[in-house]
Image: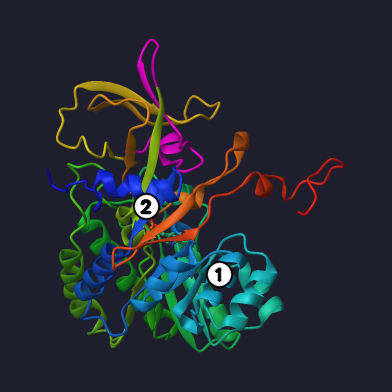
């Protein structure tokens, strides 16, 4: 097994936590998040001013964002609430990248007020930005290479994507900003999601390096910031191999020496916007078996559902599942692992081999630390779960309480609405 899927707590410890905070909950491992952040930064230590701007959408919890701030990360925001959340946590100025699309004017104003790096998704947004916030000194564009690159299953082919400035538009986009008085320039792309092929990211660097040189040649702009986007995958399956960050870094460094340095663009700051890689493997959805049912197939019914983690339901994504206390037992049974939503795709796993389980057992769904809680919803009256942090000292802190019925009613306006809301 290439990566061992193991929660850093035994069954007894999990039961003790569940006695205080009822299941389901997501538990994040602070120590592992910090160690992983340090590995990431160490791999790119040759880059002057290297930063990962954590994609807030992957895990929008202030306690987690604060850990990442302490580890030297910035943030990548795509909406006003994400900008305000980042501001509250203490991110400032160019630590914040604002990569949005179909952006409302007031969000540009907020990003400009914070001094964030504004990353424009479209040539047409230049006008919206100018009207709402003026022309900033530093501007970045999101580049969409179209058929010059192939995408992957999650994000789709670049020429089908709604994002970014095209090959034909990109040089003109910089010229336009230059003419309007921008002085500093960045270039961004995001062409893959959950990609596990290490060479893919080296090729993305090559694409941006070559484009930076071309833009220099065509309009004399010295790019100062290259943003490789996010999309570095994680090994959801035990047999998957993680992206080798040292390999990616070495490949990028080699291209940097061959393309960037001779063009006189050195030093060029290189950053990422990874979310999944940063917290994905270090969050666990802990749930309890409500029922084991035998129909045409065998079902495990959990107290968690798609509202807690919708990736398996919407993408058919694999998430590893273990049964605390039964890790060493043979996976002798085949189950569909379901939630209680009235949707037949509310399944965490289909035809999964697991040890025989019974009602009351705990189940751990792995790799729920990114795009997990964050994608939750209230469909079918489901309430979102709590988020807990396993701290470095071994204590557990609740960093978001579970929703209550009052939360469910909070926005409804009708004569019989509960009072005090
Ligand atoms: C979603 C997103 C990210 C983060 O993607 P991960 O797969 O979590 O690394 C980064 N940048 C942009 C523009 C995104 O939309």
Q: Nearer the viewer, residue 262 or 155?
A: 155
The residue carrying mark 2 is 193
> Which quadrant of the figure has residue 326?
top left
The residue carrying mark 1 is 85
> Which quadrant of the figure has residue 405?
top right
Q: Is residue 352 above or below residue 407?
A: above
Assign the N terminus to one quadrant of the image.
top left
Residue 158: image tag: none
Q: How many marks overall? A: 2
Give the percent coordinates (x, y) of residue 401: 53, 55
Residue at point 32%, 47% (across, down):
14
- Residue 299: say if magenta: yes
Residue at point 35%, 14% (across, down):
297
> For the residue carrying disc 1, how many other residues have a C-alpha within 10 Å: few (<14), some (14-19), or many (20+)?
some
Ligand 1 is found in the corner quadrant, namely bottom left
Give the percent coordinates (x, y) of residue 252: 21, 71
- Which region shows up in magenta? 292-318
Task: Say left or right for 32 vs 190.
Answer: left
Confirm whether residue 417 shows in the render.
yes
Residue at point 23%, 64% (across, down):
202
| Mark 2 C-beta closer than 8 Å to ligand 1 | yes
Give the percent coordinates (x, y) of residue 396: 37, 60
SS at mark 2?
A: loop
Confirm whether residue 151 shows in the render.
no
Nearer the camera: disc 1 or disc 2: 1
Q: Nearer the viewer, residue 188 or 75?
A: 75
Q: Nearer the viewer, residue 16 or 28?
A: 16
Q: Is residue 124 above or below residue 132?
A: above
Q: Residue furthest top?
A: 296
Task: Say left or right for 380 vs 365.
Answer: right
């Amino acid at each position: 097994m290439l990566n061992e899927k193991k929660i850093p707590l035994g069954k007894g410890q999990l039961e003790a936590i569940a006695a205080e905070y009822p299941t389901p909950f997501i538990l994040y491992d602070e120590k592992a998040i910090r160690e992983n952040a340090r590995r990431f930064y160490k791999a790119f230590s040759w880059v002057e001013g290297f930063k990962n701007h954590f994609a807030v959408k992957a895990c929008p919890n202030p306690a987690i964002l604060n850990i990442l701030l302490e580890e030297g990360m910035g943030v990548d925001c795509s909406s006003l609430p994400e900008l305000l959340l980042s501001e509250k946590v203490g991110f400032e100025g160019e630590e914040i990248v604002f990569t949005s699309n179909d952006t409302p004017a007031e969000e540009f104003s907020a990003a400009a007020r914070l001094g964030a790096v504004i990353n424009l998704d479209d040539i047409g947004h230049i006008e919206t930005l100018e009207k709402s916030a003026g022309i900033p000194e530093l501007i970045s564009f999101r580049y969409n290479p179209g058929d010059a690159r192939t995408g992957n299953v999650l994000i789709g082919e670049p020429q089908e994507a709604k994002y970014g400035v095209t090959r034909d538009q990109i040089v003109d986009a910089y010229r336009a900003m230059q003419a309007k008085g921008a002085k500093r320039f960045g270039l961004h792309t995001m062409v893959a999601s959950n990609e596990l092929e290490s060479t893919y990211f080296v090729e993305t660097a090559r694409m941006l390096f070559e484009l930076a040189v071309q833009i220099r040649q065509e309009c004399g702009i010295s790019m100062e910031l290259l943003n490789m986007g996010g999309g570095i995958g994680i090994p959801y399956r035990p047999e998957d191999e993680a992206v080798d960050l040292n390999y990616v870094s070495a490949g990028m460094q080699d291209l940097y020496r061959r393309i960037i340095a001779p063009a006189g663009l050195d030093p060029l700051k290189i950053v990422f916007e990874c979310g999944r890689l940063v917290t994905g493997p270090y969050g666990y959805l802990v749930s309890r078996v409500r029922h084991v049912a035998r129909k045409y197939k065998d079902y495990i019914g959990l107290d968690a559902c798609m509202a807690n983690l919708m990736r398996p339901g919407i993408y058919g994504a694999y998430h590893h599942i273990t049964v605390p206390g039964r890790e060493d037992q043979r996976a002798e049974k085949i189950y569909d692992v379901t939630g209680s939503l009235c949707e037949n795709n509310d399944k965490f796993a289909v035809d999964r081999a697991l040890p025989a389980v019974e009602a009351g057992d705990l189940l751990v769904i792995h790799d729920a630390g990114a795009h997990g809680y964050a994608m939750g919803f209230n469909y079918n009256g489901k309430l979102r779960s709590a988020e807990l942090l396993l701290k470095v000292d071994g204590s557990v802190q609740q960093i978001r309480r579970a929703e209550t019925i009052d939360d469910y009613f909070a926005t409804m306006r009708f004569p019989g609405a509960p009072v005090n809301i």
